[in-house]
Amino acid sequence: MTKPQTTRKKRANGVESRQRILDATVEIAGERGYEGTSIAAVSAKCGLPASSIYWHFKDKDDLIAAVIERSFDTWLAAVELPSEETGTPLERVTAMAGSVAKSLIDAPDFLRLGLMLALERRPAEPRGRTVFLQVRDIARTKIAEMARALLPDLDEESLHALTTYAVAGADGLFIQREINGDDIDLVAMLELHAQLVYEAATRMAARGRA
């Protein structure tokens, strides 16, 4: 009877320690950036020995990649088009944009760290950068799928232009909030951005039907 209980306790402790490590990494990376983040600093912040960190993660890069993945999973859950009961297509897109903005406020780490890494060029590309570019492609694909569902007349060229604009605009608004803090209402700004993207998409779709 005691053996299963011990195993469950070990698993629970392992999950808890992993979360502590990731939470500490978020704080350190937010203050010092990628270069300033170290296993020693994370160890001091979370109160776990470096050996515990290395038990969960191969190295710093693996740790940063895990932070990006965890935050992205939280954010991705908000990227869902509400049902038709929500209202018109524009109202549905606006509601989704609000949810996405709120999730970015709650879980900004994948975008904050990912953008830092994406702008860097190194002989050996960090795994964190690779992971960020992969999750970015997933986000673009999901946005494109929703655009196809709402506006099936969009051609591939227009769809690519719109998804690029949607993602790049969201990046810019996020960076603006990082710079100015709560002076930027990210929810309102992303809702407006989504409305502008949708209006542009409807014009493109109309031209395709003409």
Image (cartoon, rainbow, N blue to C red):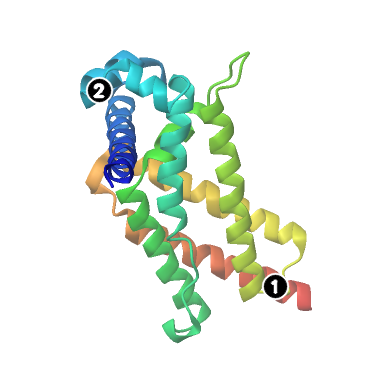
Q: Residue 204, relative to residue 161: is it above or below?
A: below
Give amino acid for label 2. Answer: Leu
Can residue 67 be seen by looking at this rendering?
yes
Horizontal and vertical percent position of residue 10: 31, 37
Q: Which residue is mark 1?
A: 205
**Residue at 55% across, 35% down:** 131
**Residue at 44% across, 77% down:** 91
For the residues labelled 2 and 1, the Cα–Cα distance comes to 55 Å
**Residue at 42% across, 82% down:** 86
Secondary structure found at label 2? loop
Residue 82 or 88: which is nearer the viewer?
Answer: 82
Residue 13 or 43: which is nearer the viewer?
Answer: 13
Residue 65 or 209: which is nearer the viewer?
Answer: 65
Can residue 38 be seen by looking at this rendering?
no
Q: How many marks?
A: 2
Q: Which residue is mark 2?
A: 48
